[in-house]
Amino acid sequence: MKVGDIITDIEKNSTMIQEMIGIIQDPEVLKLMELMHKLIYPYYLEYVDSSGLMHFENFVNFCRDFSVFPDLVSKPGLHRIFHSLSSSTS
């Protein structure tokens, strides 16, 4: 991948993140996210290890069980999502 392509990807991602932040700040969206968290969290616990961490293979299984993979997102896409989420929590 060329430096120009990387910069373009960063700019696209930055724009998407800014748009998402705007959407997430909406009170109705926050209520929906809170509800979704309460509904999904018990299922999430079934896929984490004893220390509460989810490994990539369990993330794939979670996404497969909920028809996210391969129906909506490819395995490379899951890999990017997983690493993006896992690096944001460290």
Image (cartoon, rainbow, N blue to C red):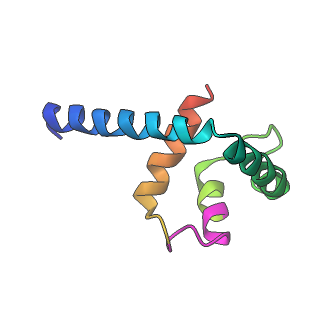
Q: Which residues are magenta?
A: 62-71
| Percent of width and height locating residue 48 | 76, 49
Residue 14 or residue 68, whichever sits in front: 14
- Relative to residue 24, is residue 7 depicted above or below? above
Residue at x 14%, y 36% (from the top left corner): 2
Residue at x 60%, y 73% (from the top left corner): 67
| Percent of width and height locating residue 14 | 37, 33
Q: From the viewer's perspective, is 73 left or right of 32?
A: left
Q: In the orientation shown, which residue stands out farthest toward the top? A: 90
Q: From the viewer's perspective, is 15 left or right of 88?
A: left
Can see residue 48?
A: no
Residue 30, image quadrant? top right
Residue 7 shown in magenta: no
What number of labels is visible? 0
- Relative to residue 27, is residue 67 depicted above or below? below
- Relative to residue 4, is residue 65 depicted above or below? below
In what quadrant of the picture does the C terminus appear?
top right
Can see residue 85?
A: yes
| Percent of width and height locating residue 71 | 50, 74
Residue at x 18%, y 41% (from the top left corner): 1
Residue 5 or residue 64, whichever sits in front: 5
